[in-house]
């Protein structure tokens, strides 16, 4: 009987799955101060639990996470924006949350009247923000490997503007290191450059394609049973923003 039990349970263990996931470098701070990141991470954990998938997650510098994903050294990164260029290299989940991208200036340098045409604009290397402004000839683009470096340069007056998502801006304004700052320490200039969704981005393997589809299905299950709405509201979104997110997901589904 002992051997029979072993034979019965061995296939179950053999099919247990796990994926390696790159989190943001300052994962704990983003989980605390970014509603888009928080919703993304909590929904992913819940969806993975439904599918019996173990998440082996570790913080990565964004540029390093992308490089390891490209080389298939890790399976996925969270909090990724979709672009056509990226879609040729990676698989994308449906949107997990939404997070607009703005051109920001520092609130303490509000008196500055530097025209955008003559400005120095900071971006994070290999980010969607960089791709959105890199071909703009009206101003000079300055790249750094992390958004924290860009933020510090902006706050110290060495940059005129910077391109951040709303989540990144709030996170940097509310960190312990910048306790004297407030949520609105960065001021958006005009309307959003792009109102993107937060996705899980997977390396292009057949295994990850299958997992991406399973994760998307599990989130649909969380939406149906009301758990996704609770997570969304607890992350700081309004009921209307939750409806907007559902519309974004439905639009993605039909693309």
Image: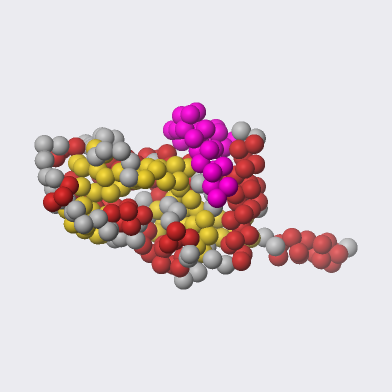
Residue 103 appears left or right of 232: left
Nearer to me, 159 or 156 = 159
Extreme-top residue of the structure: 239
Residue 207 on the magenta span: no
The image quarter containing residue 114 is: top left
What span is colored magenta in the figure? 227-255
Q: Is residue 143 above or below residue 113?
A: below
Residue at image point 24% right, 39% down: 189
Q: Is residue 13 visible?
A: yes
Which image quadrant is residue 13 in? bottom right
User: Which one is nearer the viewer's eye here, 173 or 246?
Assistant: 246
Q: Number of callouts in the render?
A: 0
Q: Residue at x 61, y 64 (%)?
A: 207
Q: How is the image coloured?
A: secondary structure
Give the quarter of the figure containing the N terminus: bottom right
Q: Is residue 124 visible?
A: no
Q: Is residue 80 above or below residue 222?
A: below
Image point (61%, 58%), residue name: 211
């Amino acid at each position: 009987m002992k051997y029979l039990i072993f034979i019965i349970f061995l296939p179950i263990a053999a099919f247990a799955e796990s994926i390696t996931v790159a989190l943001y470098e300052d994962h704990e701070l983003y989980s605390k101060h970014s509603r888009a990141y928080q919703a993304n991470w909590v929904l992913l954990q819940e969806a993975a639990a439904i599918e019996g998938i173990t998440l082996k997650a570790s913080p990565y510098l964004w540029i390093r996470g992308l490089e390891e994903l490209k080389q298939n050294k890790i399976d996925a990164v969270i909090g990724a924006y979709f672009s056509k260029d990226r879609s040729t290299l990676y698989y994308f989940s449906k949107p997990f949350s939404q997070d607009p991208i703005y051109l920001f200036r520092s609130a303490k340098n509000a008196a500055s009247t530097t025209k955008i045409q003559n400005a120095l604009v900071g971006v994070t290397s290999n980010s969607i923000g960089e791709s959105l402004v890199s071909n703009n000839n009206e101003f000079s683009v300055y790249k750094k490997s992390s958004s924290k470096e860009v933020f510090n340069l902006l706050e110290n007056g060495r940059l005129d503007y910077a391109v951040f998502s709303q989540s990144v801006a709030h996170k940097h304004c509310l960190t312990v290191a910048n306790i004297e700052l407030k949520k609105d320490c960065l001021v958006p200039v005009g309307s959003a450059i792009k109102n993107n969704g937060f996705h899980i981005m997977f390396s292009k393997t057949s295994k990850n394609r299958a997992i991406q589809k399973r994760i998307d299905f599990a989130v649909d299950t969380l939406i149906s049973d009301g758990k996704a709405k609770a997570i969304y509201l607890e992350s700081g979104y309004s009921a209307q923003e939750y409806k907007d997110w559902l519309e974004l997901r439905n639009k993605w589904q039909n693309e």
